[in-house]
Amino acid sequence: MPEPGAPTLLQSREFLLDRRWRDHVHDAAQVENAAVCDEFWQALMAIDEIGAGWGREGLGIMRAPNRMNYGWKDSLAQIAAPTLYLLGEHDDYARRIESWKALAAPQRMLVRVAGCSHFMQFERARHLLYRATAEWMSGGTFMGHTAGEFAADTAGSLVSAAA
């Protein structure tokens, strides 16, 4: 049976940008260019003409699939593919760590990245995200590691989470 909840998330500009993103910005250097927030919203509205027409004052509503529901968590133990899991320090760790722990893949690596949020691809840490993804996809490692739990500082240095 599916978990309770709706299959689609609906979020206003204010909710997405202020409550989900800017509320998780903890220092001025985290988002190097504040204009990226507006550009992000404009790009979302450009790819969803229906959602762009919804909402108050014509600002639009972001529509997205709700990936946290409908039984996919029950399948995590069956995933054997190498998995790199990057998590921003200011993301919802308690909510997201459950899926990491449920993975059974022997080659799985978690990196908790300092000084960023769920939206790290638009923040200072984006360089680490891009480098980690490229290394993992091309060689199945990141900074010489294939498995384990790590923390990365804002400069991109990696240390064991146990350290």
Image: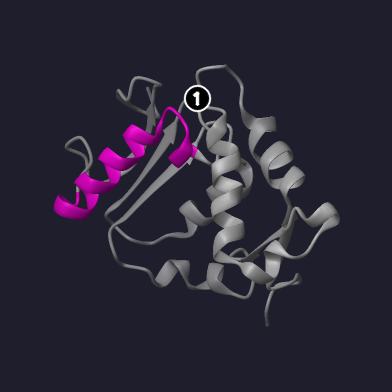
Establish if 133 lies above or below 21.
below
Where residue 62 sits in the image (x, y, percent)?
67, 59
Based on the picture, tell me whether residue 128 belongs to the magenta stretch.
yes
Residue sitting farthest toward the top: 28
Residue bearing mark 1: 115
Secondary structure of the residue carrying tag 1 is loop
Q: Main secondary structure of the magenta part?
A: helix
Q: Quadrant of residue 148?
A: top left
Based on the picture, tell me whether residue 50 belongs to the magenta stretch.
no
**Along the line of sight, the residue nearer the viewer: 70 or 34:** 34
- Image quarter in which the C terminus is found: top left
Establish if 127 lies above or below 80.
above
Q: Give left or right: position of 39 versus 80.
A: right
Q: Residue at x 69, y 46 (%)?
A: 16
Q: Quadrant of residue 69?
A: bottom right
Please tell me how many numbered marks the rendered image carries. 1
- Image quarter in which the N terminus is found: bottom right
Q: Amino acid at mark 1?
A: Gly
Q: Residue at x 73, y 39 (%)?
A: 19
Q: Give left or right: position of 109 versus 13.
A: left
Residue sitting farthest toward the bottom: 1
Establish if 82 lies above or below 8.
above
For disc 1, the neighbor class at 10 Å (few under 14, some 14 to 19, many from 20) is many
Q: Residue at x 37, y 69 (%)?
A: 79
Residue numbers of the magenta segment:
120-140
Q: Give left or right: position of 142 versus 122.
A: left
Q: Give left or right: position of 138 versus 80.
A: left
Where residue 132 sits in the image (x, y, percent)?
28, 41
Q: Residue at x 63, y 68 (%)?
A: 49
